[in-house]
Amino acid sequence: MSEMRPNYPHDWTSQTLEQLCFQVTSGGTPTSGSRRYYVEFGGLPFAKTEDLTRARTKFIDDCELAISDAALKESAAKRYPAGTIFVSMYGTIGLTKIAAVEMAGNQALCALVPPFACNSDYLHHHLEYIRPHWLKHSGQTTQANINGATVRAHEVPLPSFSEQRAIAQILDTLDTAIHETEAIIAKLKAVKQGLLHDLLTRGIDDNGELRPPQSETPHLYKPSPLGWIPKEWEQAYLGAKVEFFGGYAFPERCQGQSEGEVPFFKVSDQSNPGNERDLRVANNYVSRELARKQGWKLLPEGGVAFAKVGAALLMNRRRLLAQDSLVDNNMMVATGGDEVHSTWLYWFLQTIDFGKIVQDGALPSVNQGQLGALPASFPKLEEQREIADRLNRLDGILDMEQICLEKSRQLKTALMDDLLTGRVRVTPLLQEAQHA
């Protein structure tokens, strides 16, 4: 990011952080592990970069460690008032949080101590916006760092106090919306995990209701290797009803062939935007003629693709094939017959911890025999379909919230770029809103 001074409006001024803050300083770390310096109860919260990273809002109010009065007297640690703005300087550069309570900080955090000669929320948003700016000041060492002198010398463009306050209010409102959406998403994920467990262990009865638990209605259940399952369900090894197919060695000369041919999915394609549940976006294609000559079997739409080799195996990435396609030899595809609904199979495979069945070696891996030997319980096809539909609906709601979250983040990024540089002025915007 270029320096901002030549670009901001002519009626804005600027001051360095040293001029704007009562004090710009950093702390220190008392001797690690000392019971004299670190206390479990009643001490002063002691902030580190990890605490800033963990904070979910712009405020930091909880720290992993707390220090004693002796630590303040006998080390470089300092007591900072609530409202102090911390800027991380080592490794994770430019992360910015506001102390919600009185606390101390270590030497990796630059502390901007109030009172400030500007709106504190505006200052925080400015520091958040210019975070990439610090990278050009970082040293050419293994770990990127900035220092207190660099922070003190940074110039902050300053509109009038009223415009600072208005900019901060707009960005705070967006922040609130973002945090509320994040909270909704976290709650939906928890609900999804609970519903996934309940539907795949209790299922749905003839009235369309979730079966009551076995502890309340033992006559509805029977024992199985997976625990208690509904009496109507069939217990079998996974390989009795599900077929597993391996992928093929992908020829380098075919990489990047044009769309319209046969899509060839690789493990990395599972992370492409648009492939959150269904594999739709491929980076590579092969001709149908080549697939025929090589004897490659196209895997059917609805098959569940997953990594069988490497670290991605342990990341729970399982995706439904959105079309007949091929996969590379680091992947495997599971397909069910007439008695297994493909999306139910997708959800069932989400519950398997592949990490517990991997083969030892340089790269963790699973094979068809291991997966086929896993115990499974199969509801009737219609119940499988209803289970899958309910999980899909909840997943759709979660997807919509994720889209809203991404839009809010993009809007905030755009508004920061406009408002904090003066490219778009807040005062005219507010006047238009008042007369609308």
Image (spheres, rainbow, N blue to C red):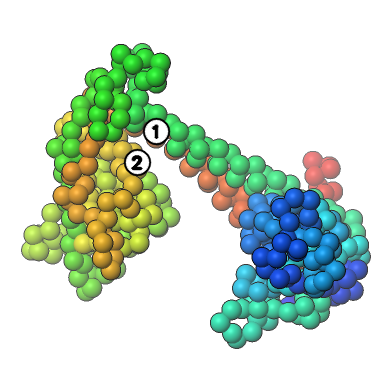
Q: Secondary structure at mark 1?
A: helix
Are dots 1 and 2 in contact, CB under 8 Å? yes
Residue type at mark 1: give it: His
Q: Nearer the viewer, residue 374 or 256?
A: 374
Residue 112: x %, y % from top left: 82, 67
- Badge 2 marks a residue whose secondary structure is loop
Left or right of 310, for residue 271:
right
- Tell me the residue at 75%/63% (across/down): 36
Identify the mark nearer the N-term, 1 or 2: 1
Q: Check the picture and name the quadrant holding the C terminus.
A: top right
Q: Residue at x 81, y 79 (%)?
A: 153
Q: Position of residue 28 (x, y in %)?
A: 76, 72
Q: Is residue 163 in sight in this rendering?
A: no
Q: How many marks?
A: 2
- Which of the image's four quarters has the N terminus? bottom right
Query: Residue 411 location, x and y as percent?
Result: 64, 53
Answer few, some or many: residues within 10 Å of disc 2's Cα (few below 14, many 20 plus, some between 14 and 19). Answer: few
Q: Amino acid at mark 2?
A: Thr
**x, y (%) of residue 409?**
61, 53
Residue 37 appears in the rendering: yes
Q: Disc 1 marks which residue? A: 197
Residue closest to the eye, 51 or 269: 51
State the residue at coordinates (59%, 85%).
141
Q: Residue at label 2?
A: 351
Task: Looking at the picture, tell me which residue is in the foreground, 39 or 311.
Answer: 39
Residue 257 in the image: above or below residue 435: below
